[in-house]
Image: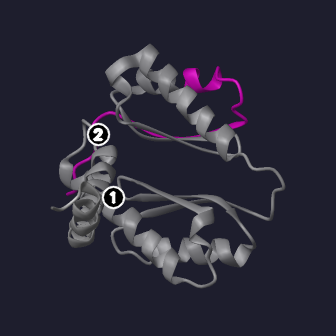
Amino acid sequence: MVTFRQFYRESRAKYTWLYHLLVIAGALVISTASACSTNRSFRSQIDDVSMTNQVRALLIQDPYVNPLKVTVATDEGEVFLLGRVSNREEAGRAENHARSLGEVWSVMNYLKVGSRSDSTYGADQQLRQGIENQLFREMGIKVLNVRVLTHEGEVFLLGRVDDEVSRQQVLGVVRETDGVLAIRNHLKAGLPQLPE
């Protein structure tokens, strides 16, 4: 008779590949779903995810860039680079990789150069979560298209809102949040422009 432990070990060995496949598929679904917003076409959202992943792949392949220190985000074809790198050459290389993609129409390089002794990762995550929660409490569904990124107390706002009034409301919430050292506002208002 086969014990549960033997059955478990044999099953685990047999189906490890299936487990890994399901984990990868789940990660793809989650990353695509998190990039989805309500007033943009599915195609443009997928394009942004694809551009972000292509830039990340280029950074990983470059032995002179530490991809763990660079956050890449894309919004409607505009690539944003955030983080802290060792030197100006590394920052320039990261920017050049982003610009090398044909679909990218703009690169915003916010990479900081030099070392920092204290880690702000936990504080940044807490700041981002606090802003997102407050935005949702005050504005509700209107802010599903707003993406909040933080780095060393600096807040980056990406995405699209319905109108200029909503844009100003988002800025007001962020300005009133404790711990915000600076705001980089890249929010767009109104419907996206259709390509000609």
34 or 52: nearer the eye? 34
Mark 2 or mark 1: name the one nearer the start of the chain.
2
The image position of residue 158, as x and y in percent, is 46, 43
Q: Amino acid at mark 1?
A: Val
Measuring from the top left, give residue 136's x and y in whole percent. Answer: 42, 21
Name the residue beneath numbered marker 2: 37
Q: Is residue 122 above or below residue 196?
A: above
Residue 104 seen in this snapshot: no
Q: Looking at the picture, does residue 102 appear above or below residue 143? A: below
Disc 2 residue crowd, few under 14, some 14–19, many 20+, Cα 10 Å: some
Secondary structure of residue under mark 1: helix
**x then y, percent, for residue 167:** 46, 27
Judge whether 6 appears above or below 179 on screen: below
Q: Residue at x 55, y 83 (%)?
A: 62
Q: Secondary structure at mark 2?
A: loop
The image quarter in which residue 196 lies: bottom left
Q: Which mark is residue 49?
A: 1
Instruction: Say which residue appears at 59% left-offset and 85% top-offset.
Output: 63
Q: Is residue 151 visible?
A: yes
Q: Quadrant of the N terminus?
A: bottom left
Which residue is rendered at x = 26% and y = 64% of the image? 6
Q: Is 174 within the magenta?
A: yes
Q: How is the image coloured?
A: one colour
Q: Residue furthest front?
A: 1
Q: Which three-letter amino acid code belongs to the residue tagged 2? A: Ser
Comparing 42 with 61, the one in front is: 61
Q: Is residue 111 left or right of residue 33?
A: right
The reply to whether the C-beta atoms of the residues labelled 2 and 1 are less than 8 Å apart is no
Where are the magenta residues, as a range?
171-196
